[in-house]
Image: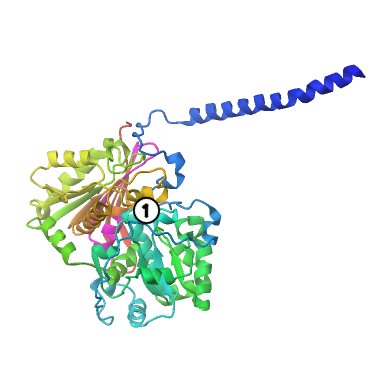
C-alpha cells in the first residue's frame, strides 16, 4: 500500500512536466509545418517601421476583397468615445451655394430615367434624418487609402439616397475633403458641433464583408424608425447585399438600377458631391498645362519599392511585370491619336517613376513635389500615440492629402489610362469612364498577369470587357 501511495505521489508530480513537454512538442510541430508552407522563393519583405502582426487590421488585400479594419466583432455595438485630437483642424466653414437639382450633371444623364427623376426629388428635399460617412482613425479604425475612402463615400451616399436621408461627410484626417473640393448639389460639410450633437455611434459593419447583410437590415429598420446613421465604409459594392433586404431591393428595382453597380453610378454620385475648389483647380491647371492630350498611368508597386508606404506589404506589381506596361504604352504611342501624347504617372514607388522617366524622357510628367504617400498611414500615431511617433505635422499631412487627391483627379483626366491593381486607379477610371488597359499581377505567385481592356457602355451596364487574357511571366 505504501508503494502504491508513493507511485501516485510521483505521478501527480510528473503531470505538469508531461503537459509542458507535450505543449512544447505541439508548438514545435506547428512551426515546422508553417515553415514548410512558406514560399521561400517570394521576394523579400521590406524593413518595416512597424510589425503587421502587432496591428493585423493593416494587412492589405486585393481590390476585389473587402478589408477588415475592426479590432473586435463586438466593437460596433459599443458607443464610441468622442476623442479630441490636435490634428482636428478647425476649418472655417465656407459659404455653400448648391447647384440647381433640376439640372443634373452630364454624368447622370445616361443612367435610367426613373433614377434621374428620383435624384431630382432627393436633392430638392430636406430629409428628417441624416446618414454620415465617418472616417476617424483616432477611433481605433483605419479607413483605407484614397481609393478605399472614395468607394466608402459613394457607397454610403447611395445608401443614404435609398433610405431617404440627408448626407454628410465627417472625415477630418489627414484633412477634410473641403480642403480640395467644394460641394456641388449636396452640402456634405458637417461642423464639429453637429458631429458632437450626434449620439449615434459609428457602425463599422461596412468595413467587413460578412457584416454587410446585417447593416442592410439595420438600414431598412432605420428608414422606418427615422434613425440617424453614422457609418464607416470602404466597401467595393453594396449591391449584392441590397438584394437581400426586401424594401431596399424593391427601391433598387423601381429605380431601374438593378444592373447598375458602383462602377456604373460612381461618376454621377461623385459629381453630385464634389468639384475642385479654386486652389485645387489652380493645382490641376499647373500640373496639366500644355500637356493635353495625355495618357495617364497608375501603378501600385508596393513591396520594398514603396518608400511612402511606411509598413511592409507584399508586391502588388512585381518588377517582372514592368515590360508588359512598356509594351502597352509603346502600342498606344504608335497610334496616330497618341503619337505626340504626354504621359502622366502616379505611383507609390519613386524608383518606378524614375524608370518611366528614363524610358519616355520627353513624354513623362508627374505631380510636382509628390510624396508617394499612403493616406491611411499618416495617422498611425492616432491609433497608438504611445508607440508610434508623429511622422508629419498637420500642415504637411494636409499638403500630402491634397497631392493624393490631385493625383487621383488628374489620373482620371487622361484620354487613355493604364493601371495596375489598386482602388486608386479604379475610382479615377470610374469618374471619367474613358478607356483603360488594366494589368493585374497574381500577388500570391507573381507568375501570372491578367490583362483586360475596359470601355464604358452608357447603357446602365457598367464596365464592358473588350479583351481579357492571362499572361505567364517569368517567376522572380
Of the 4 image quadrants, the one containing the C terminus is: top left
Q: Is residue 269 left or right of residue 444?
A: left
Q: Residue at x 48, y 71 (%)?
A: 249
- How many residues crowd mark 1 within 10 Å: few (<14), some (14–19), many (20+)? many
Q: Is residue 429 left or right of residue 240?
A: left
Color theme of the render: rainbow
**Figure label count:** 1
Of the 4 image quadrants, the one containing the N terminus is: top right
Residue 305 lies in the magenta stretch:
no
- The answer, for residue 93, to whether it is visible in the render is yes
Q: Residue at x 37, y 72 (%)?
A: 167
- The answer, for residue 259, to whether it is visible in the render is no
Point out residue 369 in the picture as x, y percentages from the top left corner. Answer: 17, 48
Point out residue 102 in the picture as x, y percentages from the top left corner. Answer: 27, 82
Point out residue 302 in the picture as x, y percentages from the top left corner. Answer: 31, 41
Residue 62 vs residue 280, the one in the foreground: 280
Segment tinted magenta in the rendering: 426-448
Q: Is residue 113 left or right of residue 58?
A: left
Point out residue 49 in the picture as x, y percentages from the top left corner. Answer: 35, 38
Residue 373 vs residue 113, the one in the foreground: 373
As drawn, 451 above or below 179: above
Residue 433 lies in the magenta stretch:
yes
As drawn, 145 above or below 188: above
Q: Secondary structure at mark 1?
A: loop
Q: Which corner quadrant of the image does residue 109 belong to? A: bottom left
Q: Which residue is mark 1?
A: 144
Q: Residue at x 46, y 73 (%)?
A: 228
Amino acid at each position: 500500500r505504501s508503494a502504491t501511495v508513493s507511485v501516485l505521489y510521483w505521478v501527480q508530480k510528473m503531470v505538469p512536466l508531461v503537459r509542458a513537454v507535450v505543449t512544447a512538442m505541439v508548438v514545435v510541430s506547428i512551426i515546422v509545418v508553417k515553415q514548410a508552407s512558406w514560399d521561400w522563393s517570394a521576394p523579400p519583405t521590406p524593413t518595416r517601421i512597424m510589425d503587421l502582426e502587432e496591428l493585423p487590421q493593416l494587412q492589405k488585400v486585393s481590390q476585389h476583397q473587402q478589408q477588415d479594419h475592426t479590432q473586435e466583432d463586438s466593437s460596433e455595438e459599443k458607443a464610441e468615445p468622442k476623442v479630441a485630437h490636435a490634428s482636428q483642424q478647425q476649418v472655417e466653414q465656407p459659404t455653400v451655394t448648391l447647384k440647381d437639382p433640376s439640372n443634373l450633371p452630364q454624368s447622370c444623364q445616361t443612367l435610367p430615367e426613373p433614377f434621374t427623376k428620383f435624384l431630382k426629388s432627393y436633392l430638392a428635399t430636406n430629409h428628417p434624418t441624416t446618414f454620415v460617412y465617418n472616417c476617424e482613425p483616432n477611433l481605433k479604425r483605419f479607413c483605407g487609402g484614397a481609393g478605399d475612402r472614395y468607394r466608402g463615400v459613394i457607397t454610403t451616399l447611395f445608401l443614404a439616397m435609398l433610405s431617404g436621408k440627408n448626407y454628410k461627410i465627417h472625415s477630418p484626417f489627414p484633412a477634410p475633403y473641403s480642403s480640395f473640393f467644394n460641394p456641388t448639389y449636396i452640402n456634405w460639410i458637417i461642423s464639429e458641433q453637429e458631429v458632437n450633437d450626434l449620439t449615434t455611434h459609428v457602425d463599422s459593419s461596412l468595413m467587413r464583408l460578412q457584416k454587410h447583410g446585417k447593416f442592410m437590415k439595420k438600414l431598412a429598420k432605420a428608414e422606418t424608425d427615422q434613425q440617424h446613421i453614422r457609418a464607416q465604409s470602404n466597401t467595393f459594392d453594396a449591391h449584392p447585399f441590397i438584394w437581400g433586404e426586401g424594401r431596399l431591393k424593391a427601391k433598387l428595382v423601381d429605380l431601374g438600377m438593378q444592373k447598375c453597380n458602383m462602377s456604373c453610378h460612381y461618376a454621377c454620385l461623385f459629381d453630385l458631391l464634389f468639384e475642385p475648389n479654386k486652389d485645387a483647380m489652380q493645382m490641376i491647371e499647373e500640373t496639366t498645362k500644355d500637356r493635353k492630350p495625355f495618357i495617364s498611368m497608375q501603378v501600385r508597386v508596393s513591396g520594398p519599392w514603396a518608400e511612402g508606404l511606411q509598413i511592409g506589404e507584399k508586391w502588388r506589381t512585381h518588377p517582372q511585370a514592368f515590360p508588359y506596361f512598356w509594351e502597352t504604352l509603346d502600342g498606344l504611342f504608335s497610334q496616330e491619336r497618341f503619337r505626340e501624347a504626354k504621359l502622366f504617372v502616379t505611383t507609390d514607388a519613386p524608383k518606378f517613376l524614375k524608370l518611366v522617366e528614363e524610358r519616355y524622357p520627353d513624354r513623362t510628367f508627374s505631380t510636382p513635389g509628390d510624396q508617394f504617400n499612403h493616406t491611411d498611414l499618416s495617422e498611425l500615431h492616432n491609433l497608438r500615440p504611445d508607440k508610434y511617433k508623429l511622422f508629419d505635422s498637420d500642415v504637411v499631412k494636409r499638403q500630402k492629402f491634397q497631392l493624393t487627391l490631385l493625383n487621383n483627379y488628374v489620373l482620371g483626366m487622361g484620354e487613355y489610362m493604364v493601371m495596375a491593381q489598386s482602388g486608386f486607379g479604379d475610382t479615377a477610371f470610374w469618374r471619367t469612364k474613358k478607356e483603360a488597359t488594366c494589368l493585374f499581377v497574381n500577388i500570391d505567385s507573381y507568375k501570372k498577369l491578367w490583362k483586360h481592356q475596359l470601355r464604358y457602355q452608357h447603357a446602365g451596364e457598367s464596365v464592358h470587357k473588350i479583351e481579357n487574357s492571362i499572361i505567364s511571366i517569368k517567376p522572380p
